[in-house]
Amino acid sequence: MAVAPDRLWRHFTRVADAPIVIERGEGCYIWDTEGKQYLDALAALYCVNIGYGPWPEIAEAAREQLERLPFFTNWVGFATPPALELVDKLSELVPIDVGRVFLVSGGSEAIEASLKVARQYHRLRGEPTRYKFVTRRSAYHGTTMGALSINGSPGLRSQFEPLLPGCVRVPMPYRYRCPYCSDRPECTLQCADEFDATIRAEDPLTVAAVILEPMQNSAGSIAPPPGYFQRVREICDEHGVLLVADEVICGFGRLGEWFGSIKYGIEPDMMTMAKALTSAYAPLGALVASEKVAEPFFREASSSFLHGITFGGHPLSCAIALANIDVFERGDLLGHVRSHTDEFRAAFDRLGDEHPLVGDVRGDGFFYSLELVKDKETKATFTPAERDDVKSFITLGARERGVYLRVDDRAETAVQFSPPLVAGRAQLDEYLGVLRPVLDETYDRYVANGS
Ligand SMILES: Cc1ncc(COP(=O)(O)O)c(C=O)c1O
């Protein structure tokens, strides 16, 4: 059959971006239709966490499920065995006392479900005035209209306004350029206190939930300072506001734990997850609600959560998720990430010390970002006119040399490393072996020669 790649409406793709067709994957590598091999330093989109296999046990689980029952719904009282089994398995893995798990088909849908649960939860408890959501600047939580409304990047929202009313944002814990304490030896946690100030300014009785990632991806691996989440939890409790951990990227081993909430000792009321729940072998998302959150929904026989997605908790995806979690457990992927964390961090720190373009190194586990600057002393960044150009220059320079990576510039310009969790020293060396000359050329072009 003839393929017409020019008719495929690619996501977030500029007209100028060259189309590229990936047809095969193995381990940490992908191949395009021209036969060119790339190291996948982004696990596709932070999601193919077990790598591209081959994992015959996942193919077998999918085949068995398709033969037994290709689909049935979780609506109006029904369920399927893999959905029930997956919910039990997730309840073992998450760090909260699980009330219910609502299965969807992806991250944005998990966020949508969390927004709706939060609003209905407060109504059921007699506080119908609570409808607002507090998130962090630059944060990304998806693109459907509700998820988009809580996003922290004005550039993503502006074409689609007006969005949900009552979505407000606070600064992220951005130590490198923190307006409160980047000049002090230690973080003062004023970034966490901003939640308190903002909730008070909005009127606490209007605020439904605070939603944030354990380590924020957008803006480049923004990690919480010590004590941050404990303070945010206290603030939420004081004001009767729900705390939602968006685990869409941090979940399933990226930081060396099942969830970022475990890593940072967060006790959320709800958790959203997707992506590596199936290692992206099939679309699936979940909203996990604590006992506290679920309880008001189940008080009366006539009540229900008025929400549903046809493909939410698709049995094929649930069977694949279970097989995926089995691969994690049998291969001790969390242990693998933990055993490489120090080595990976040290290698990126070394690059940060040596390279004039690397201003800040952030991250943990298998999730790092290098923020680029033109001058390390002044932390001067690229001009608005240069930013797009720098992003393309690095992305295409790495791609030509056989590495697929991402340059995030939703805040400042940051090069990322978020490979499949089966990567090791060889893949790190390959990545750095490509990144160094690309950064050298970037420096020559945009700083030394001041193009
Ligand atoms: C933190 C976070 N939340 C939510 C989403 C939305 O997930 P999806 O693209 O599956 O809708 C993403 C997607 O990248 C994400 O990174």
Image (cartoon, helix red, strand yellow):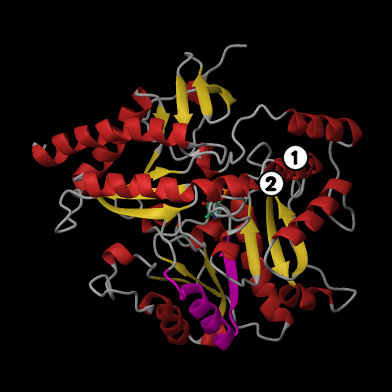
Residue farthest top in this picture = 1
- Left or right of residue 236, residue 361 in this image: left
Using a 10 Å C-alpha cutoff, classify the residue at mark 1 as few (fewer than 14 neighbours), some (14 to 19) or many (20 or more). many
In front: 246, or 260?
260
**Disc 2 + disc 1, Cβ < 8 Å:** yes
Asked if the stretch drawn in magenta spans residue 38, the answer is no
Quadrant in the picture for residue 121: bottom right
Compared with 219, 119 (above or below) is below
Say which of 238 and 154 sits in front: 238
Q: Is disc 2's CB within 8 Å of ligand 1?
A: no
Residue drawn 84% across the image and 51% down it: 85
Q: Give the numbered dot on residue 320.
A: 1
Residue 98: x %, y % from top left = 75, 68
**Residue at left offset 56%, top offset 53%:** 256
Does the Cβ of the disc 1 residue fall within 8 Å of ligand 1?
no
The residue beneath circle 2 is 284
381 is higher (above) or lower (below) than 132: above
The percent position of residue 125, horizontal first and vertical second, equals 72, 84
* The residue positioned farthest toward the left in the image shown: 449
- Residue 40 appears at what percent x and percent y? 48, 32
Quadrant of the drawing holding the C terminus: top left
Specify the label residue 64 is tagged with: none
User: In the image shown, does 115 or 377 lie closer to the viewer?
Assistant: 377
How far, Cα to Cα, is label 2 from label 1? 9 Å
Left or right position of 85 against 364:
right
Give, as a single range, the part of the protein colored magenta.
225-246
The quadrant in which residue 89 appears is: bottom right
- Whether residue 241 appears in magenta in the rendering, the answer is yes
Amino acid type, mark 2: Leu
Q: What kind of residue is marked 1?
A: Ile
The quarter in which the N terminus is drawn is top right
Circle 2: element type? loop
